[in-house]
Amino acid sequence: MAQYEVVIGLEVHAQLKTKSKLFCACSTEFGNEPNENVCPVCSGMPGVLPVMNEKVLEYAVKLGQAVHCEINRKSVFARKNYFYPDLPKGYQTSQFDLPICEHGRIEIDTPKGRKTIGVTRIHMEEDAGKSIHSASENVSFVDLNRACVPLLEIVSEPDMRSAEEAVAYLKSLHSILRYLDICDGNMEQGSFRCDANVSIRPKGQETLGTRAELKNMNSFRHVQKAIEYEVQRQIDLVEDGEAVVQETRLYNADKGTTHSMRGKEEAHDYRYFPCPDLVPMVLEEAWIEKWASELPELPEARRARFVGQYDLPEEAADQLTAERETADFFEAAANAFDGEAKKIANWLMVDVARLLNDTGLTLAACKGAPEDLAALVALVEGSTVSARSAKDILADVLRDGADPKALVKEKGLAQESDSGALEAVVDEVIAENPAEAERVRGGDKKVVGFLMGQIMKKTQGKANPGVVGKMLAQKLS
Ligand code: ADP
Ligand code: MG
Ligand code: ZN
């Protein structure tokens, strides 16, 4: 492993969140009856003409602007010719020579710090339909609901050097698409798909090694596993004196392996040529400026702002800004909170994240507002409730929208901070445990925890640990 360098370039297909398809008015809705969303245009009937969906152009340009691409003022659709039952026209309308965007970059987080990955190009194209193979009968069906649904293909430079970097790039791109609200990013349903080109070369070698293209990975985890397996397979080949061959390989999620789907010989010759049915798109400056002005604050900028404005560590800012919804929730809670924003960040990243994970809920689906979380954290910071109790009622507050103050009262969770009342309990515990008390006096700090535990037991966990700690230290010094 040490003497090889891993080289990875990714091709991502992002399905756009438009209401209608790329060249016709059919719905893009997922999960309808087969062939429900189909018309003569997207089923490739003779004599029909495509009409470009302007939203697709807008989304493509906005993504290009978000990843610092040059926007080509003139852009052309091309026909990519191949035969397959789910491609009714016999060609896919895509882009070739003059894609809409080129020469961009995306920042990623690596263990060695920030790194820039080049974006070679972004182009617009239509999706194909779906073949459905019957398990019981010896027949296949074709569903054209997905045919002509708009996609953006985002091609990276071969700039990634590990499976982790590849996943970090995918997460950054995923996050940007979600911020722009142009793709739902659902990998399982295939609205965010990725092909990974993987090669190895001896360290120090300039030229690229022969690559394999990996397909069929529908989660970040699969991408990671598939690349790791493939890298090891290529190293083993080279070590055995064999050569890596250029081919397309499929990932098998059950086995965690990749196997050959087709070699270079079977690769298609797509015979690209400009589509005569669609005129070249010439972009007006006014549109480009308008779309640029509509971009939201993007994850990279927001992350930097969070570090500065809320004094968050880089990793926390990274985690909180990955999804716009989380970032918005954090900001609203932090602004409603009269203390360090870091406290809110920790609650969100640990306990709230766990709650959402366990319940399968999103923040949007929760009844509790950011202000409720802020109020709960304020109760902990003000020593009104213990962190333990606050965690116990987090679900009621966040999921069900209960008022934290009222709930603490109702459940009798308020901490005992009154020193008079606590002193009696502390004295009692010291009297009941003379040997332990003596060890603390002798300097054995570990035993303090035991005494604290006894005090918590007597107060049903309601004693304010700060106050008790001070009292014990005073009495046993
Ligand atoms: P194709 O059109 O056949 O898919 P491209 O030249 O467009 O080929 O490359 C597709 C992707 O493969 C790009 O992301 C590119 O960075 C990556 N790539 C090309 N050569 C290599 C290589 N030797 N090793 C790893 N990735 C590569
Ligand atoms: Mg490819
Ligand atoms: Zn249609």
Image (cartoon, rainbow, N blue to C red):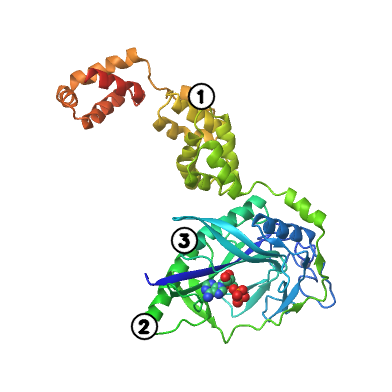
Q: Is residue 305 above or below residue 28?
A: above
At which x and y percent is residue 17?
69, 57
Secondary structure found at label 3: helix
Residue on which the image places disc 3: 164
Residue on which the image places disc 1: 405
Q: Do the residues labelled 1 and 3 touch (CB within 8 Å)?
A: no
User: Amino acid under label 3?
Assistant: Glu
Residue 302 quadrant? top right
Q: Is residue 304 left or right of residue 16?
A: left
Q: Is residue 348 above or below residue 377?
A: below
Residue on which the image places disc 2: 240
* Circle 1 or circle 2, nearest the eye: 2
Task: Give the residue displayed 74% in from the left and 48% down from the top.
Answer: 293
Looking at the figure, which quarter contains the N terminus? bottom left
Q: Which of marks 1 and 2 is nearer the N terminus?
A: 2
Residue 118 quadrant? bottom right
User: Amino acid under label 2?
Assistant: Asp
Relative depth, front residue between 255 and 15: 15
Name the residue furthest top: 420
| 3D distance between C-alphas at marks 2 and 3 | 26 Å
Task: Give the residue displayed 41% in from the left and 85% down from the top.
Answer: 242
Task: Give the residue displayed 63% in from the left and 49% down from the top.
Answer: 298
